[in-house]
Image (cartoon, helix red, strand yellow):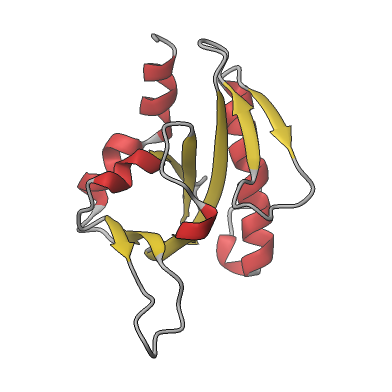
Amino acid sequence: MPNTNWSELSHLQLGCYAEYYAKMEFSSYGYDVYTSEVDDHGVDFVAKNPVDGNYYEIQVKSIRNWGYVFIPKDKMEIRPTRLVFLLLFADGNLPDCYVVPSTAWTVPNALLVERNYGKPGQTSKPEWGLNLSKKNMPLLEPFRAEHYFLRDKHI
């Protein structure tokens, strides 16, 4: 059993753990996982689906408890083969995992937000975001990793 005192890890340590955990999740469902040494295009790894042979680009995001995570729009193009693997960490538990297809952002809601910064005086770049709160958990639940992987087995 791994250490689950996530609050003791730095932001970088938690992110590193999340990436390895995500790769293990995909591998455990039979995906072939391909890693790169540099994440300069918003892709943490590529996974090949064992059922249909398609390749998926995976961006891993992690957070402790609740809050907001985002992906700059210039790092994530909306397409069916682009996925966000989200890990929610709470001390004393293994992370809760979710697979959010980038296409989910075509219908924004309280959970899935699109922020089009770029007006004069704004320094942030346009982004896709996830508002993670107890209130939004029902919107996140359909993306639970188990649902994604089990559905995927029946393609």
Q: Position of residue 140 (x, y in %)?
A: 29, 45
- Quarter where residue 113 is shown: bottom left
Q: Tell me what residue is drawn at x 52 percent, y 10 percent.
A: 51
Q: Is residue 42 left or right of residue 145?
A: right
Question: Which residue is painted at 42% across and 32% down in the image?
Answer: 80
Which residue is the extreme one toward the right? 37
Decide if residue 49 is on the left or right side of residue 151. right
Report the quarter where the N terminus lies: top right
Left or right: where 48 falls relative to 81: right
Viewer can see residue 7: yes
Q: Residue furthest front?
A: 120
Query: Residue 146 lies in what quarter of the image?
Result: top left
Return the x and y of residue 49 as percentages of the image width and height.
55, 19
Residue 59's place in the image compared with 80, above or below, is below
Question: Which residue appears farthest toward the bottom when viewing the image?
Answer: 121
Up/down of 87 relative to 45, above or below? below
**Is the C terminus in the top left, top right, bottom left or bottom right quadrant?**
top left
Q: Is residue 82 above or below residue 60?
A: above
Task: Determine the residue positioned at 45% across, 77% down.
Answer: 124
Q: Which residue is nearer to you in this view: 10 or 118?
A: 118
Residue 57, picture quadrant:
top right
Q: Measured from the top left, where is residue 104 in percent x and y?
A: 31, 42
In the image, 145 versus 112, the foreground residue is: 112
Numbered disc total: 0
Q: Position of residue 87 (x, y in %)?
A: 49, 49
> As drawn, is 133 to the left or to the right of 4?
left
Asked whether the viewer can see residue 132, the reply is: no
In front here: 40 or 84? 40
